[in-house]
Amino acid sequence: MTRILIPSGALGLGYDQTALDRGIAAKPDLIAIDGGSTDSGPSYLGRGVSKYTRASTKTEWAGLIRAAQSAGCPLVIGTAGTCGTDSTVDWLVDITREILAEEGMTATIATLKSEQTTVGDITPLPGAPDVTADEIAACTHIVALAGAEQIQAALNTGADIIIAGRTTDTAIIAALPLQNGDDAGAAWHGAKIGECGALCATNPQSGVILVDFDAEGFTVTPLADGAHATPHTVSAHMLYENSDPFILHEPGGHLDVTAASYTALDETRVRVEGAKWVPASSYAVKLEGARVMGYQTIIMATIRDAHYVANVQKWCDDIAVKHSLKVADRLGDVAHTTELRIIGGSATLGDLENRQTTPHEVGVMGIVTAEDQDTARAIAMLLNPYLLHHPLTKTEEVPTFAFPFSPAETDRGPAYGFVLHHVMELDDPMQAFRLEVLS
């Protein structure tokens, strides 16, 4: 049997200390925590930085280092620093060394770096954008998603703390059970269920869970007061960030949970068996890359006038036409895009919005993207008078709306976009990764 303690869905989200102490007392074989994902968009990968503050990260990471030393087991983090670039791995190494020095502790650190300077032949995944060689070359950072094999290589160094670059969310959990000979289907299935900590339980913000793996299946145990795993909460997590509730693709194969069974052992624990691991004929890893798509300036107005709220889309459409003409007249043929998003209306789904209601107020946010910041700001400034005073018709009195900020325009700087949603085949799992043991 292999016992994995998962403190939280990600370092930076916090964890229940009492529940963590229970996990330590249960003598886990490994403590695993995710460091991030693409959830918060391409900017973090594009810039190679964490979305969480250094101070907050240090506080939580120090608690986990103490927990691992108390439990006498390795501590593993994947996708360090939100995006898993070399720079964020180094950032967390620096924090780790600072913690060890302040706590008077010693530990061997291993790093697994995932960043790519070049890419070979790549295959697009479904929905991947068309990408050119120039667009790939323009990426500020490209990372490959490590799987269980690369984490196993890091564990085999005997390091106390493993800080990995970009990994799949499941790899850091599945690696040790697979290495110990536990059922492969259970290893990957339990890793998927446990990847976000207590999101598979009834008290999701508590964070801490134990997953026990063996030759037939796995058992999920949430550890916080009031947290209960049920067959529903556990099985439902297969749909989290996954388009297929039965199939999950990983480096080297895919997980099939079609025949899985979920049984409540008591009010807290759930037992799962029956998942299958299907090896692939070749070994491939997913690539993620981001590049600067332009520079942005945003401007926002808020509207409470019932007449304008009820006709806000018509108002925005008219502004878009008039603003476009003014940009061409004043600035010439400059490459740019201007979006008007209705906050409180269709800002999230746009044309896909299917709820037609009239709120009492809306915000209209203009997002201008251009090839440089000065141009983006100039275009946003041309939008300013429309958002402040534009009437619906020529015969209406000139209205006045509200800007929440002065100046109304805010420069966002470079705007990043994802470029790669592709896989790259490897002759050897370690071919695209670099493992180093630090003194």
Image: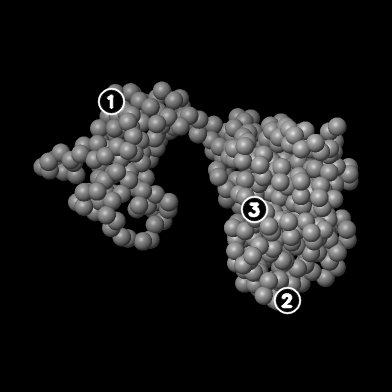
Colour scheme in the image?
one colour
Quadrant in the picture for residue 229: bottom right
Quadrant in the picture for residue 267: bottom right
Q: Work out how far the residue at label 2 is from the one at label 3, CA to CA, in angstroms.
A: 25 Å
Q: As drawn, is 286 to the left or to the right of 298?
A: right
Q: Work out how far the residue at label 2 is from the one at label 1, CA to CA, in angstroms.
A: 71 Å
Seen in the picture, residue 163 relative to 18 is either above or below; the reply is: above
For the point 33% across and 43% down, the residue is: 364
| Image location of residue 373, percent across then percent down | 44, 25
Q: State which tag comes first along the sequence, 3 or 1.
A: 3
Q: Which mark is residue 15?
A: 3
The one of 370 and 328 positioned closer to us in this rendering: 370
Q: Residue furthest left?
A: 395
Amino acid marked by disc 3: Tyr
Q: As drawn, is 151 to the left or to the right of 308?
A: right
Q: Nearer the viewer, mark 2 or mark 1?
A: 2
Amino acid marked by disc 1: Asp
Q: Which mark is residue 265?
A: 2
